[in-house]
Amino acid sequence: MKIKTLLLALTLCAITLHASRGKDKHAAAADQGASATLRFDHLALHVADLPASVAFYSDVFGLQEIPSAATGIRWLSLGKGVALHLISGRSAPVADDRSVHLALAGDNLDPILQRLRERRIPWSNSTGTPGAVEHGRSDGVRQIYLRDPDGYWVEVNDALKKR
């Protein structure tokens, strides 16, 4: 499955913002009628073992490495100009909070589940049931949660599947 879109539960989805004019006198003075278009560009994760993290995201999710602008950082494409930046040097533990996660959407969850089985990488549903796939969303999307080599939570779903 090729990952086409990066969806992030926090604020990690591709969005476009337009600065509004004249909401109050301070905002009007600040932008003086100018507008800015913004879109989500990348997510950076601080990792302990850079090669292991690159291998995980490449092997399990099929992300392709793209040129990085700095040493000690490797970039993986999430498509449409969005990237995952993996930055080496993490030594502190990652917080165990499933509500803070990276979400990847694809059109078929089954190839991901197969790769996870082959690599003996555990996953669960949103309530933490090992090996379970979440089927409870009202839109019919299936989803799972797993941890990357550093312990960051990753949601994978089939939101791009035609229903």
Image (cartoon, rainbow, N blue to C red):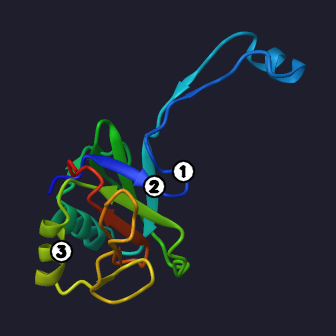
Q: Three-letter amino acid code at disc 1?
A: Thr
Q: Is residue 148 left or right of residue 37?
A: left
Q: Earlier in the sequence, mark 1 or mark 3?
A: 1
On screen, residue 162 above or below 25: below
Badge number at residue 141: none
Q: Residue at x 50, y 58 (%)?
A: 9
Label 3 neighbourhood size at 10 Å, few (<14), some (14-19), many (20+)? Answer: some
Q: Residue at x 89, y 18 (%)?
A: 25
Q: Position of residue 139 (x, y in %)?
A: 36, 56
Q: On the image, numbered disc 1 is attached to which residue?
A: 11
Circles 1 and 2: CB distance less than 8 Å? Answer: yes
Badge number at residue 8: 2
Secondary structure beneath dot 2 equals strand
Q: On the image, numbered disc 3 is attached to which residue?
A: 113
Circles 1 and 3: CB distance less than 8 Å? Answer: no
Q: Kindly indicate the quadrant of the structure image that contains residue 115.
A: bottom left
Q: Position of residue 155 (x, y in %)?
A: 37, 67
Label 1 neighbourhood size at 10 Å, few (<14), some (14-19), many (20+)? Answer: few
Query: Could you tell me which quadrant the N terminus lies in?
Result: bottom left
**How far is disc 1 from disc 2 in space, using C-alphas?**
6 Å
Secondary structure beneath dot 3 equals helix
Q: Three-letter amino acid code at disc 2?
A: Leu
Q: Position of residue 58 (x, y in %)?
A: 20, 62
Label 2 neighbourhood size at 10 Å, few (<14), some (14-19), many (20+)? Answer: some
User: Residue placed farthest to the top in the image?
Assistant: 33
